[in-house]
Image (cartoon, rainbow, N blue to C red):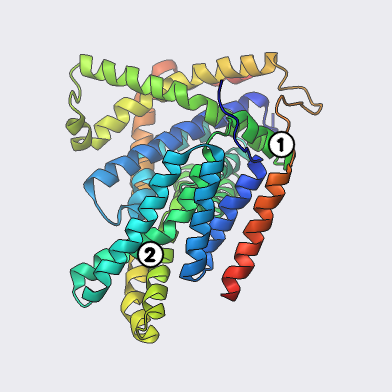
């Protein structure tokens, strides 16, 4: 049996992403940044993905180290360029980390249920659901088309795909678009049978409710923001 | 006929997924060919290749709202999957503007499509914003360690303004080229294949 870990509500995960985005816009001092990244690391551990979290955390400190080593040689243009990359990517890391945390162990149906709870218009939720659900089919189609191309001797190796981008695009996108018509017909039939056309409110299997750990997480985020401003 | 039906929403979802596939392929191609600043070219590369997808959307679902929903879904998807969390705003705004141009202006058909596609392509400008934040972060870190702030700002000012202009220009040129290529592909594969009404009867089931 799988171990149980602390789970968070998708809405509080969304709050984490938004907080990271704001961090990108209104930079906090370095100390607060370290604090936030460490907090994200703990969230990964709580969520039961120690390995993924450690990779991100290690990457963060590697970027800091690279910046620390290169900084004395800043007069050199080449070193300055790499220093720029190190510092910039370090600033980008929290957002990517927050998003990875949000997608980690969250089912798509939970996301959909949470978005419904947030009163996102129905016309947006249906295409988004289709988008998520359609991806596996899309990758399968991609593989079959690739096989068919190889069989006919078009762009047999992967390098050739890059050498003739227009040909590649035409041979891959057009068949997918052709089959998209049929897929959309199938999907709408399936959706209508399952009652998507019903104008009444839909129910969900997933119970979306803010639990105590969600309130703790949001509280810490707000505190982190205030404390970061004060330091 | 004016209102969007369930089938239309599902078709929009599928076309958005295909559009997203184009974005992903463009991103991968750029990542392997241009090492450092590939993110500024993502919108233009996508514009070059995605013309046919956009054409199909406006031919199959010729109603106001389709493009808006497509852009908003792209934005939401970016937000949730965290590629460029800040890009959902430009996505939605550009999509609404493109939709308005497509259905509420009195230009000729060809120019209207071209214009709205160009505007729609600007929705992917999100990836350029991080570069600007990267620059800010760098300047901040230099200032924090005792370099002269005004001097640094002067050195780094051209980087963002030039890249911004390059990006805008590239998007305009590439989207015009892209819609022309799209039109060619459309005539070659979708017009001839099953007559002009191909795909239209599906929606009346």
User: Who is closer to the viewer here, A53 or B168?
Assistant: A53
| Quadrant location, the N terminus of chain B | top right
Q: Position of residue B44 (x, y in %)?
A: 36, 50
| Residue occupying the point 38% across, 39% down | B24
Q: Secondary structure at mark 2?
A: helix
The chain to which mark 2 is attached is: B
Name the residue tied to disc 1: A116
**Residue B164, labelled with which disc?**
2
Q: For residue B131, which quarter of the picture? A: bottom left
Q: Position of residue A62 (x, y in %)?
A: 32, 57
| Residue occupying the point 22% across, 36% down | A162
| Residue occupying the point 49% across, 63% down | A33
Q: Residues within 10 Å of mark 1 (few under 14, many from 20)?
A: some
User: Who is closer to the viewer here, B39 or A175?
Assistant: B39
| Quadrant location, the C terminus of chain B | top right
Q: Residues within 10 Å of mark 2 (few under 14, many from 20)?
A: some
- Is residue B168 among what the camera can see? no
């Amino acid at each position: 049996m799988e171990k149980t870990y602390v789970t968070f509500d998708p809405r509080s995960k969304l709050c984490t992403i938004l907080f990271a985005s704001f961090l990108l816009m209104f930079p906090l001092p370095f100390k607060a940044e370290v604090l936030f990244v460490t907090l994200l690391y703990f969230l990964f551990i709580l969520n039961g993905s120690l390995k993924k979290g450690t990779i991100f955390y290690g990457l963060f400190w590697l970027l800091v180290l690279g910046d620390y080593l290169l900084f004395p040689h800043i007069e050199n243009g080449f070193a300055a360029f790499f220093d720029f990359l190190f510092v910039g990517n370090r600033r980008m890391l929290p957002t990517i980390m927050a998003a990875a945390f949000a997608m980690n162990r969250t089912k798509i149906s939970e996301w959909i249920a949470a978005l419904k709870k947030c009163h996102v218009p129905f016309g947006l939720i249906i295409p988004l659901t289709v988008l998520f659900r359609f991806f596996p089919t899309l990758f399968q189609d991609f593989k079959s088309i690739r096989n068919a191309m190889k069989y006919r001797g078009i762009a047999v190796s992967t390098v050739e795909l890059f050498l003739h981008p227009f040909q590649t695009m035409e041979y891959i996108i057009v068949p997918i678009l052709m089959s998209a018509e049929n897929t959309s017909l199938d999907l709408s039939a399936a959706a209508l049978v399952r009652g998507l056309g019903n104008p009444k409110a839909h129910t969900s299997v997933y119970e979306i409710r803010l639990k105590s750990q969600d309130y703790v997480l949001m509280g810490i985020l707000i505190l982190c923001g205030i404390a970061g401003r004060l330091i | 006929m004016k209102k969007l039906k369930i089938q239309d929403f599902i078709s929009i979802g599928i076309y958005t997924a295909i559009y997203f596939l184009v974005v992903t392929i463009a991103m991968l191609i750029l990542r392997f060919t241009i090492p450092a600043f590939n993110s500024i070219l993502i919108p233009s590369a996508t514009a070059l290749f995605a013309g046919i997808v956009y054409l199909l959307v406006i031919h199959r679902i010729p109603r106001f709202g389709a493009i808006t929903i497509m852009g908003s879904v792209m934005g939401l998807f970016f937000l949730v999957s965290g590629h460029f969390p800040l890009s959902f705003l430009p996505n939605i705004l550009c999509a609404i503007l493109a939709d308005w141009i497509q259905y509420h202006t009195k230009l000729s058909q060809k120019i209207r499509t071209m214009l709205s596609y160009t505007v729609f392509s600007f929705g992917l400008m999100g990836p350029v914003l991080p570069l600007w934040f990267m620059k800010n972060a760098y300047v901040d870190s230099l200032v924090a360690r005792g370099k002269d702030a005004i001097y640094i700002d002067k050195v780094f000012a051209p980087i963002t303004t030039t890249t911004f202009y390059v990006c805008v220009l590239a998007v305009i040129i590439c989207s015009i080229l892209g819609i022309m290529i799209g039109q060619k592909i459309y005539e070659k594969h979708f017009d001839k294949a099953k007559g002009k009404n191909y795909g239209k009867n599906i929606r009346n089931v």
